[in-house]
Structure formats: structure tokens, C-alpha cells
Image: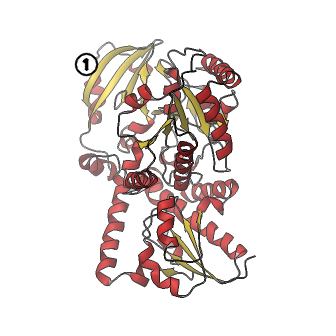
């Protein structure tokens, strides 16, 4: 246990060092525990003011078991709730609340004498929890009354965004209602497959048709769906009708209209993923699995699942893999496919993405003749995921390094696939798309927690868990090391048999 007097601030990257400058007068050690990763240029701003400052992230105090416990606590709290109230209300706030509570429990064990401060408007921080304990609100410490009012309005804005994110205003009115909507015009794709009929609510977006016969694609009023489909498809057998929706096309208004819908896996569901947030769906709905990893996920989570929609391509399906050993040209481009973060599980930490980005930048220093491109996840543009200035922070970090071979992508993913040779990720599904284009892909998990691509590393794919391991792998891939390429090609072959 640390017996020295310390000041501990729980915050995110939006904390400004000049706003807490008065704490420097006290001169004890300052510890910043952030939901984000502070980049070196950001750390320097604090070090210019505070003589003795240390930077930590939540996950450096909370183990994988702690975070899984947090998920389980929230799941228990929300087990009798459904839909909007469960996920966007109790669930997200519960994740933040229990995470902060577990963090403070660890701090009480590790530090004997400390003063605790919190930045309650920070992303991922539960102001509700810190109001229950002895803790100084930094907003009260340095903000004027007018500034506090601005912060309050910002909190309301972020709360509304967390509820309606991804929906248009018109749709948001529909999904927040507890009543059946009077009208809901939406696109559907209808397929015939294996002597049965399938209606895809919202149409196919991420998934592709593999072997179904498309019989209708257009807009209908879901409130009167039966009459509309009878008019458009008089030959359809309603006794063999199945409804499905891609996970990312799900809308809460569907729960008022349909008793039995299959949520279709339109991304990678790691078998060892957090499961608590699936209380969002009605208990009689099922999950449509398109791959073996989907089935493992559902079985581990004890979720009802089926294999009815096998006429669709899994996002992990690779139409063609060219297993070759031709990757020996000297000029290489390495692309980082960053992952998305938010409070859909406590096992995800925003700082994980930042740590991998800084590590990736260090590779650019190590291999000055190789181009390195950071590709932010599209979710970074959404404030409730990574914060309002997440991409701007990465841009400032890259600009501050001033490396000629390191850049931040502003291109389409297709363009990055075209120019990249080696693709690195922690768990982005896009890495499998790169492999379909005969690119080298490898995973890197620096978190010291569970590896979400474990299913694939068990097939033999290239994987690193430390910066030195990642550097060695990248070096081998740049040089076209024969043993490394052979291992990757063998893993490709095993993958092809599964998908």
C-alpha cells in the first residue's frame, strides 16, 4: 500500500491541465486515471505544470475478471427490463457506475492517504456514483456558474445522443414510444430459400446474398406488412415466413410489431465477448448465426439461435483467398485498422485503441523506410463512442511526431485496402476483408485481457501481445520472412475450410 499523500483525478482526455493548475501548489504526487489514453503530446502539457504526475487508465487497475464482474452486475440489474429502457437507460449508466465503483474499491486498497477528484462530464465517468462518495467535483473547483451551466447543457446533449445515436429524428420519435406506431415505412428485401420465405427488415446492408432468390426489394409500411406483402407477393406462403434484421439495422419499433424476429450476425461476434447488453432484445427473439464463431458466441451467452439464414454470406466469408508467397517487395505500407469503443460492455476500454495507436506510431520510428497509416474506426465520428474530438486528438498526435512515414487516413476503406500491404488490428472485422484481397493481416492485443480474435489466433494467425512482439512480426512481414509467410498461409488455408 502506498503511504504517501497523493491527489487522484478520475477523468478522460478532455481534462485540461491549466484548469487544475491550483492543485500544483499542493505539490503531492498527482495521479490521473483516465478512460482514454493520453498521447505523449498531451502528457507533456501536464508535465509542464506538475512536477510529479503519473498517467494511468482504468484497465491498469481493473482486471479482466473485474470487468466481467461489472458486466454481470449490470446484467442482473437489467434482467427484468427490455428494449430502450434496458440498454440506453439502465445498462449504459450501469456499466459506467459499476466500473467507477470497482475502480475506487481498488484505490482504497492500494492507497492509504489520497484526495479524490473527478471530472464528471468526462466520457465513461459516472457522475451518479461519485456523488455517493467523498470526492471533489472538478467542475465545482474551477468552473464559474456560467461555465457549469454550459457543461450541464453538454451533458444533456450527450445523454440524448446516447439514446438516439444512429437514428434520424423522425425515427427517434417512433422508437421511444411505448405504443405501436401508426405507420413505419421501411425498406425490406424478401428472399425465397430452401422452400421458405425470408423478410429482411431494413434490407441487406452489410451482408450479401449467397444463394437465396430475391423476390422483392422495396419500401412497405410495416404496420400493415401482411396486407402489403400479400399484394406484392400473392404466391408467398405465410406459414413459412421468417423475419430477420441485421444487428446494425435493428430498431426498437420492430419490437412492437413482431413477436419473433432473428437478429442476424452482420459483424464478428467473438465467442468470448461480453454478453450483458443482449437484454436489449425481446426474450422470444433469436440470433441467426452464419458462422461457427457466431454459434459459439450464442451458446456461451445462452442466447437462442438458429441457422435459418444460411443463404446469406457471413461477414467473415472470404470469396477468394490467394495463398501465395509473393510478398517480398521492399516497399511496404502498413495500415492500422482501429476498433470502435463504447459502453456496450465493460470489457471494452477506450484507452485500448489509443495505446495501440501510440504503439503503431512507435513502429513508424523503428521502420523509417516503411509507410504507416492509421485508419480511425468510423465510430470515432460519434461523440458517445470515442468523444467529440477523438480524431482531432489523433491528428495532433501524428502532427506532433512529424514523421514523414506516418499519416492519418482520410480515404475510403477501399482505397486503404488498395495501397496497404500489411493490416494490423485488435479486433476489427475489416482485417478479414483485407485478407480476401491477399493482404497480410495480424492481430495485436496489448490489454493483458482477453483476446477477441482468439478464435482466429488458434487457427495460427499472426498475433502479438507486446510492442516488441509486434515489432518483430512487422519486421518479418516487411522482409517476407519465409517461416512467417508459411505460418500465415497455413492459417489462411484453415480459415478457408471454415468460411
What percent of the width, then of the height, locates residue 17? 45, 73
470 vs 249, left or right, is right
Q: Is residue 137 above or below residue 79?
A: below
What percent of the width, then of the height, locates residue 89? 44, 59
Task: Say which quadrant the C terminus sits in.
Answer: top right
254 or 65, nearer to the observer = 65
Q: Tell me the colour scheme of the image.
A: secondary structure
Return the residue found at the far right: 1
Q: Residue at x 30, y 18 (%)?
A: 216
132 or 82, nearer to the observer = 132
What percent of the width, then of the height, locates residue 311? 47, 17
Q: Across the whole image, how many numbered discs are drawn on residues?
A: 1
Q: Circle 1: is it few (<14), some (14-19), or many (20+) Cα within 10 Å?
A: few
Task: Tell me the residue that label 1 is attached to.
Answer: 232
Q: Residue at x 55, y 38 (%)?
A: 425
Q: Is residue 97 above or below residue 451?
A: below
130 or 83, nearer to the observer = 130
Task: Please tell me in which quadrant of the rendered image residue 269 appears.
Answer: top right
Q: Residue at x 35, y 15 (%)?
A: 214
Asked which secondary structure carries label 1, the reply is helix
284 or 430, nearer to the observer = 430
Amino acid at each position: 500500500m502506498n503511504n504517501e499523500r497523493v491527489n487522484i483525478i478520475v477523468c478522460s482526455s478532455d481534462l485540461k491541465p491549466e484548469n487544475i493548475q491550483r492543485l500544483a501548489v499542493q505539490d503531492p504526487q498527482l495521479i490521473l486515471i483516465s478512460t482514454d489514453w493520453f498521447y505523449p503530446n498531451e502528457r507533456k502539457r501536464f508535465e509542464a505544470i506538475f512536477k510529479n504526475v503519473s498517467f494511468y487508465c482504468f484497465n491498469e487497475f481493473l482486471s479482466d475478471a473485474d470487468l466481467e464482474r461489472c458486466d454481470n452486475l449490470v446484467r442482473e440489474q437489467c434482467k427484468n427490463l427490455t428494449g430502450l429502457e434496458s440498454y440506453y437507460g439502465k445498462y449504459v449508466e450501469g456499466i459506467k457506475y459499476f466500473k467507477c465503483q470497482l475502480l475506487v474499491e481498488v484505490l482504497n486498497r492500494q492507497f492509504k492517504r489520497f484526495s479524490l477528484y473527478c471530472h464528471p462530464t468526462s466520457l465513461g465517468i459516472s457522475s451518479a456514483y461519485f456523488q455517493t462518495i467523498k470526492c471533489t467535483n472538478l467542475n465545482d473547483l474551477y468552473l464559474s456558474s456560467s461555465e457549469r451551466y454550459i457543461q450541464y447543457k453538454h451533458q444533456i446533449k450527450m445523454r440524448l445522443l446516447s439514446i438516439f445515436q444512429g437514428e434520424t429524428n423522425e425515427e427517434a420519435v417512433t422508437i421511444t414510444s411505448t405504443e405501436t406506431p401508426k405507420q413505419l415505412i421501411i425498406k425490406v428485401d424478401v428472399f425465397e430459400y430452401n422452400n421458405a420465405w425470408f423478410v429482411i427488415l431494413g434490407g441487406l446492408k452489410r451482408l450479401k446474398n449467397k444463394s437465396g432468390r430475391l423476390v422483392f426489394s422495396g419500401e412497405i409500411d410495416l404496420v400493415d406488412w401482411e396486407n402489403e406483402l400479400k399484394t406484392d407477393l400473392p404466391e408467398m406462403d405465410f406459414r413459412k415466413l421468417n423475419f430477420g434484421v441485421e444487428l446494425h439495422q435493428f430498431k426498437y419499433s420492430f419490437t412492437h410489431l413482431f413477436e419473433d424476429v432473428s437478429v442476424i450476425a452482420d459483424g464478428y461476434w467473438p465467442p468470448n465477448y461480453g454478453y450483458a447488453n443482449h437484454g436489449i432484445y425481446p426474450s422470444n427473439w433469436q440470433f441467426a448465426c452464419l458462422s461457427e464463431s457466431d454459434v459459439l458466441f450464442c451458446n456461451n451467452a445462452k442466447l437462442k439461435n438458429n441457422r435459418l439464414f444460411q443463404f446469406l454470406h457471413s461477414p467473415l466469408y472470404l470469396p477468394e483467398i490467394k495463398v501465395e508467397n509473393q510478398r517480398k517487395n521492399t516497399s511496404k505500407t502498413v495500415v492500422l485498422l482501429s476498433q470502435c469503443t463504447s459502453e456496450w460492455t465493460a470489457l471494452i476500454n477506450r484507452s485500448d485503441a489509443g495505446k495501440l495507436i501510440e504503439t503503431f506510431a512507435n513502429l513508424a520510428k523503428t521502420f523509417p523506410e516503411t509507410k504507416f497509416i492509421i485508419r480511425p474506426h468510423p465510430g470515432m465520428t460519434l461523440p458517445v463512442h470515442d468523444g467529440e474530438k477523438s480524431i482531432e486528438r489523433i491528428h495532433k498526435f501524428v502532427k506532433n511526431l512529424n514523421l514523414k512515414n506516418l499519416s492519418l487516413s482520410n480515404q475510403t476503406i477501399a482505397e486503404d485496402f488498395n495501397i496497404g500491404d500489411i493490416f494490423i488490428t485488435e479486433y476489427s472485422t475489416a482485417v478479414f476483408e483485407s485478407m480476401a484481397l491477399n493482404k497480410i493481416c495480424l492481430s495485436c492485443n496489448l490489454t493483458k485481457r482477453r483476446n477477441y480474435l482468439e478464435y482466429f489466433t488458434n487457427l495460427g494467425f499472426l498475433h502479438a501481445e507486446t510492442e516488441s512482439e509486434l515489432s518483430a512480426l512487422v519486421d518479418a512481414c516487411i522482409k517476407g520472412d519465409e517461416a512467417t509467410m508459411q505460418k500465415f498461409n497455413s492459417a489462411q488455408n484453415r480459415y478457408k475450410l471454415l468460411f
